[in-house]
Amino acid sequence: MNASLILTKKTLLAVVAAALAACDPAPYEVAPPPSGPAELRIHAAGVAGAAALRAQAGDAVVELGPDDDGHYVGTISVPAGEQHLTIRAYADEDGDGAPEVIAEDSTVVDAKAAVRSAVFARLHRGAALIKSLSLARQDPRVGERVPFSVVRVLMPDETPGWVDWASATCGMDLEFVDRAKTRGWITFRQDGRCSFMVWTFGPDLDTSYEEFEVTVDVLAARAD
């Protein structure tokens, strides 16, 4: 074979290889997972006669103050992961000058690193059937698929009850991962203030035991 022809082919292959190398995209870089403490924005419905509400998760304690909706709110910083959150209401009902606990309830929250989650809770002087509803985002955006979880207890007849949902003021899509409808995702379809109801039902789905109202401020979708 002609030596000049072999050289030409080698030169051509080298040129093609160099061109392909120049066209290769930059190596794909995987963003590191979020790090840092999690924040829980707590919305607690108060108890009649309560003078103060406090929330505690581990060693962190926050005083909850009233908002315009009649709830008690506050933000607590916690490590990422499963957190046991306790909310207590205090009042000096015996008049001795020292407030005592008049209502208390605890729930479990999956706190996400570097994310502010919303926790909705309602205190009762007796046991609450729905202990809390948690959203993985305090301020969800339109079109964002937001994980949720409902923590509930047994029905009065000691059966595991079901949860049902109804939107009162906004459109939203729900996806459930369990038959009892206590875990899944919410996708809001419009921005603004959104209120919706959660109910607990007995296993026959005929008896409603408790209603739980949640109000969320939904942000507009991000501009592309």
Image: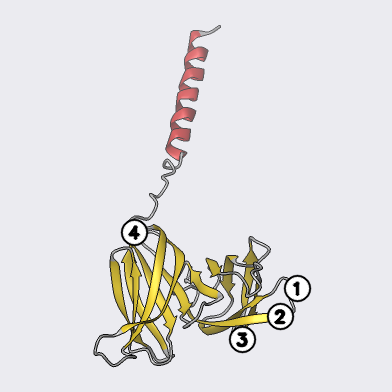
Structural distance between the alpha carbons of marks 1 and 2: 7 Å
| Residue at numbered disc 3 | 168
Q: Label 3 is placed on what type of residue? A: Ala
**Secondary element type, mark 2:** loop
| Residue at numbered disc 1 | 204
Residue 112 image point, x, y percent = 41, 60
Structural distance between the alpha carbons of marks 4 and 2: 39 Å
Total numbered labels: 4
* Residue at figure coordinates x 64%, y 81% from the top left: 209
- Nearest the viewer among 24 and 28 is 28
**Secondary element type, mark 1:** loop
Label 1–label 3 contact, CB within 8 A:
no
Q: Which tag is nearer the camera, tag 3 or tag 2? A: 2
Structural distance between the alpha carbons of marks 3 and 4: 34 Å
Number of the label disc, if any, that sits on residue 136: none
| Residue at numbered disc 2 | 207
Q: Label 4 is placed on what type of residue? A: Pro
- In the rendered view of the protein, which quadrant contains the N terminus? top right
Q: Quadrant of residue 100?
A: bottom left
- Mark nearer the N terminus (1 vs 3): 3
- Mark nearer the N terminus (3 vs 4): 4
Is the residue marked by circle 3 packed among few (<14), some (14-19), or many (20+) residues within 10 Å? few
Label 3–label 4 contact, CB within 8 A:
no
Q: Label 1 is placed on what type of residue? A: Asp
The vertical placement of 147 against 64, above or below, is above
Q: Quadrant of residue 47?
A: bottom left
| Colour style of the rendered protein structure | secondary structure
The vertical placement of 181 against 100, above or below, is above
**Secondary element type, mark 4:** loop
| Residue at numbered disc 4 | 79
Label 1–label 2 contact, CB within 8 A:
yes
Is the residue marked by circle 2 packed among few (<14), some (14-19), or many (20+) residues within 10 Å? few
